[in-house]
């Protein structure tokens, strides 16, 4: 289908011309029920999308566009396990990981539901043993610290969730995350930990990721500085992977491996055994609540009519701004410190999924696809980049996320947090006109040249769109739903843009080139096989290394 030449697309282009000059705040003046009409709820989550540059007609046209792309069918194909990730020849079935017990699904002769529940049972039993202290380390002590070693989807989801749900942790285990190949990440994480009470989870779908395997090997060296006997690795290292052979080659007992399947994409894997660190930190029951929350959103996404379907609405609003109002980025502003890793998590979810420039038949698209996703928690963000949101050129649509109930009711803090969240969306929408700014300056005693000089700097154009997502509380169930909401939003956008949201070939080239450069850093002679810049950078580093006095094994000296 030629998306940008379709009747539905053209209708949106001309509709945009019609309402280009309409201010959101004017629409509020004429539509008394606007906030009701443009709000939708699912269990624990309320989305108010009334502060967007839309009319009822805009939504109608956007939903027409969604329908015209076969969204309903593609949604059925995903949930039904069809091979929609066609460049990797895989189904996309992360939703099967959070189905309640008792359903049945067979894919390629494999009983998916039985496999999922058997791994969940294994996780439950393991978590029970580690949390209760039945699982002992080599010196007979119980585990106090869990270190998850993984990167990308094997890190961002579990890290974000454990940070978000800190108040729900049972408190008998600390959890740490090591992802970066920068040795400082591992060194700083291990400082203060003891090998005899530390459990490592090596989390890697492929078990071939350079960063994860190198960090795991260095962690094992550190562990052996205390444990000495390699046989003790068995009670301190477990693996989560689809690749049993590589796990065994690494030296982890297959008994201590938690499997998942190639129909779970890395960035959609926190619901699988990749969530083991979450289950250990919160307890298995809390992990189950997270899954139940995601399942509730899956149900909503599958069953709610498009007009009331939260992921569809958010996706189509994103398309409205990206494709018809030229907004190339989207900000995520959680007014919740516990969600401080949520924007980083969404960056992978969204940008690795929809950062594609060719459509499903391989043609370069003549329309924009995945936007840049970015953000930070409020109120910090207000004192950092909100200047650009309010007065910068162009618009940056933003999602504001806030919980009604705080986990830490200290004095006026939560009221102040909430007031700032609501005030910012109001300010972004209303702005401050030249007349209002002038009146303020005059009231402050400015006049003449000075007033005229200051005036343009004091004007806020307004009409800047936001969604407000109000959570009843940031608890495991609602967080599960919130994450699934964004997963499905990304799915819908990928369908409309006609791209494959489930591969990630774009991460490969840099990995390949790093493998070429790595041995060159120790080459005896100058490197000249790259472009002049890359050669010079490599040679500069080679020369620096050569100038350093020889040390012992750098691997071990890190842990001296
Ligand atoms: O490099 C990107 C990526 O492949 C992500 O898609 C994935 O989440 C991450 O690396 C980690 O991969 P793995 O779990 O196989 O180590």
Image: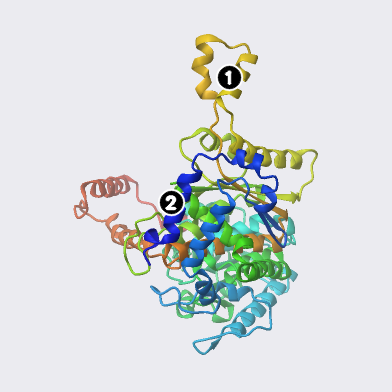
Dots 2 and 1: beta carbons under 8 Å?
Answer: no
Instruction: Quarter of the image for the N terminus: give it.
Output: bottom left
Q: Nearer the viewer, mark 2 or mark 1?
A: 2
Whole-number angstrom distance, CA of label 2 to CA of label 1: 36 Å
Q: Eyeballing the image, is 396 above or below 216?
A: above
Q: Eyeballing the image, is 554 above or below 380?
A: below
Asked whether the viewer can see residue 318, the reply is yes
Disc 1: which residue: 438
Question: What x and y, as percent, mark residue 385?
Answer: 53, 37
The mark total stands at 2
Q: Looking at the image, which is closer to me, 437 or 144?
A: 437
Asked whether the viewer can see residue 380, the reply is no
Q: Eyeballing the image, is 422 above or below 5?
A: above
Seen as rendered, the residue at the extreme bottom is 109
Q: Secondary structure at mark 2?
A: helix
Q: Is residue 265 left or right of residue 27?
A: left
Q: Is residue 555 left or right of residue 362?
A: right
Question: What x and y, as percent, mark residue 18?
Answer: 48, 45
> Which residue is drawn at the image coordinates 69% and 75% (left, top)?
124
Q: Secondary structure at mark 1?
A: helix
Question: What x and y, as percent, mark residue 359?
Answer: 37, 65
* Mark 2 or mark 1: whose residue is earlier in sequence: 2
Q: How many neighbours does mark 2 have within 10 angstroms: few (below 14), some (14-19), or many (20 or more)?
A: some
Q: Looking at the image, which is closer to me, 29 or 154?
A: 29
Q: How many neighbours does mark 1 have within 10 angstroms: few (below 14), some (14-19), or many (20 or more)?
A: many
Question: What x and y, as percent, mark residue 293?
Answer: 68, 66
**Which image quadrant for residue 521?**
bottom left
> Which residue is drawn at the image coordinates 49% and 58% (left, top)?
350
> Which residue is drawn at the image coordinates 70% and 41% (left, top)?
417
Disc 2: which residue: 13
**Which image quadrant for residue 363?**
bottom left
């Amino acid at each position: 289908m030629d998306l940008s030449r379709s009747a539905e697309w053209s209708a949106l282009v001309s509709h945009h011309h019609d309402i280009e000059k309409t201010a959101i705040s004017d629409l509020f003046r004429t539509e008394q029920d606007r906030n009701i009409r443009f709000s939708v709820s699912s269990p624990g989550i309320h989305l108010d999308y009334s502060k967007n540059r839309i009319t009822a007609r805009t939504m109608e046209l956007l939903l027409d566009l969604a329908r015209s792309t076969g969204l309903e069918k593609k949604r059925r194909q995903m949930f039904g396990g069809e091979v929609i990730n066609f460049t990797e020849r895989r189904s996309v079935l992360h939703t099967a990981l959070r189905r309640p017990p008792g359903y049945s699904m067979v894919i390629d002769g494999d009983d998916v539901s039985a496999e999922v529940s058997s791994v969940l049972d294994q996780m439950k039993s393991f978590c029970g043993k580690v949390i209760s202290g039945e699982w002992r380390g080599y010196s007979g002590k119980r585990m106090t610290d869990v270190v998850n070693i993984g990167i990308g989807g094997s890190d961002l989801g579990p890290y974000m969730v454990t940070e978000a749900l800190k108040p729900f942790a049972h408190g008998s285990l600390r959890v740490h995350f090591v992802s970066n190949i920068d040795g400082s990440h591992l060194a700083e994480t291990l400082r203060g930990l003891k090998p005899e009470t530390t459990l490592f989870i090596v989390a890697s779908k492929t078990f071939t990721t350079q960063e994860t395997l190198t960090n795991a090997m260095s962690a094992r060296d550190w562990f052996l500085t205390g444990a000495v006997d390699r046989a003790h690795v068995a009670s301190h290292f477990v693996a989560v992977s689809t690749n049993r052979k590589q796990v065994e080659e690494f030296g982890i007992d297959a008994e201590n491996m938690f499997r998942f399947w190639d129909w779970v994409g890395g960035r959609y894997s926190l619901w699988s055994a990749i969530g083991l660190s979450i289950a250990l930190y919160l307890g298995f029951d809390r992990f189950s609540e997270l899954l139940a929350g995601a399942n509730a959103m899956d149900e909503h996404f599958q069953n709610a009519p498009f007009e009331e379907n939260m992921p569809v609405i958010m996706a189509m609003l994103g398309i409205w701004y990206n494709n018809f109002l030229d907004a190339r980025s989207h900000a995520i502003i959680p007014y919740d410190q516990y969600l401080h890793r949520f924007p980083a998590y969404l960056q992978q979810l969204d940008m690795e999924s929809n950062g594609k420039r060719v459509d499903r038949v391989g043609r370069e698209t003549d329309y924009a696809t995945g936007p840049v996703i970015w953000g930070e928690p409020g109120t910090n963000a207000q004192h950092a980049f909100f200047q650009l949101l309010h007065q910068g050129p162009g618009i940056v649509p933003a999602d504001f996320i806030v919980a009604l109930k705080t986990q830490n009711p200290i004095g006026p803090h939560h009221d102040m947090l909430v007031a700032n969240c609501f005030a910012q969306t109001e300010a972004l929408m209303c702005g401050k006109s030249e007349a209002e700014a002038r009146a303020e300056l005059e009231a402050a005693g400015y006049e003449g040249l000075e007033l005229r000089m200051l005036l343009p700097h004091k004007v806020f154009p307004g009409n800047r769109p936001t969604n407000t997502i109000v959570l009843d509380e940031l608890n495991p169930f609602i967080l599960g739903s919130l994450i699934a909401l964004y997963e499905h939003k990304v799915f819908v956008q990928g369908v409309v843009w006609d791209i494959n949201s489930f591969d990630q070939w774009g991460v490969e080239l840099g990995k390949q080139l790093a493998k070429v450069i790595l041995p060159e850093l120790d080459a005896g002679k100058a490197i000249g096989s790259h472009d002049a810049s890359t050669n010079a950078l490599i040679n500069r580093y080679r020369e620096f290394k050569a100038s350093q006095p020889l040390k012992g094994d750098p691997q071990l000296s890190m842990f001296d």
